Image (cartoon, grey):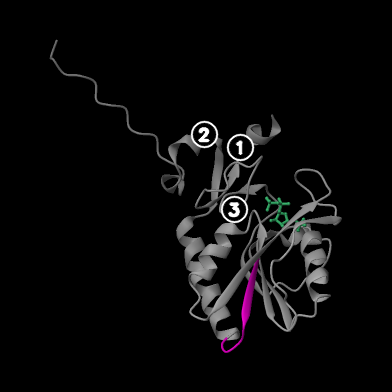
Amino acid sequence: MSGQTEPPASPAVPSPGLEQIPAVFHDDIESVLIGADDIHRRLDELAAQVDVDYADRELLLVGVLKGAIFVMADVARRLTIPASMDFMAVSSYGSSTTSSGVVRILKDLDTEIEGRDVLIIEDIVDSGLTLDYLMKNLRSRKPASVEVLSLLTKPTRREIELPIRYVGFEVPDVFVVGFGLDFSESYRGLRSIVTLKPEVYAG
Ligand code: PRP
């Protein structure tokens, strides 16, 4: 006996980006699609553009609950122009992963928007049906303008063409969670956008 002990096994090489995600989630994650640093760099750019575009105007940010909460917070605190915040909650009649375009308002705005510049904040635009309803609904209240900022867009899933003025990232037609996006109300708090292993949502 030499008294030597076996060297510890080399730690498994983590998938790129996993180090920014709590270990308890690692087994569920297939890949990190957009890392937290890239998201924050992009939000810096988008907020800077909003600052320029809305200088000297009265901006109202309208977050669409629940997914938009982190984008809303991160955009709002980057702006150097004054901006108010309000929220809407809508329910789409569809399956858990697709929307039907028939939308019910669960929580309406607290404020009047007539004559105001409205910027809808979304986490993702998928089919576009939710946003189409929201834009029509808000335009009927005669705001000065209605534009959209969305962290993610899935252009290949679009059923209605919509003008999205500020887009963070285009993503392929894969199921993504994190940064506000959930699966069964989990994973919203992840700082990155990730894909889940199929067994997580198939079971
Ligand atoms: C998501 C997202 C958008 C909508 C996009 O919300 O936040 O509002 O779906 O889908 P569409 O473009 O196909 O209409 P969801 O209904 O999942 O609610 P949540 O934000 O509370 O998770």
**Residue 148 x %, y %:** 69, 71
- 132 vs 53, left or right, is right
Q: Amino acid at mark 2?
A: Asp
Tell me if the residue at label 2 has its CB under 8 Å from ligand 1: no
Asked whether 95 or 65 is in front, the reply is 65
Which residue is denoted by mark 3 in the rendering?
A: 180
Which span of residues is magenta-colored?
A: 55-62
Viewport quadrant of the C terminus: top right
Look at mark 1 in the image and give the residue it sits on: 197
Q: Does the Cβ of the disc 3 residue fall within 8 Å of ligand 1?
A: yes
Q: Is residue 75 left or right of residue 63?
A: left
Calculate the distance from the C-alpha at mark 2 to the C-alpha at mark 1. 8 Å
Residue appearing at x 48%, y 56% in the figure: 36
Q: What's the residue type where badge 3 is placed? A: Gly
Rendered location of residue 97, percent (x, y) = 75, 45
Tell whether circle 1 marks a residue whose Cβ is less than 8 angstroms from ligand 1: no
Q: Quadrant of residue 146?
A: bottom right
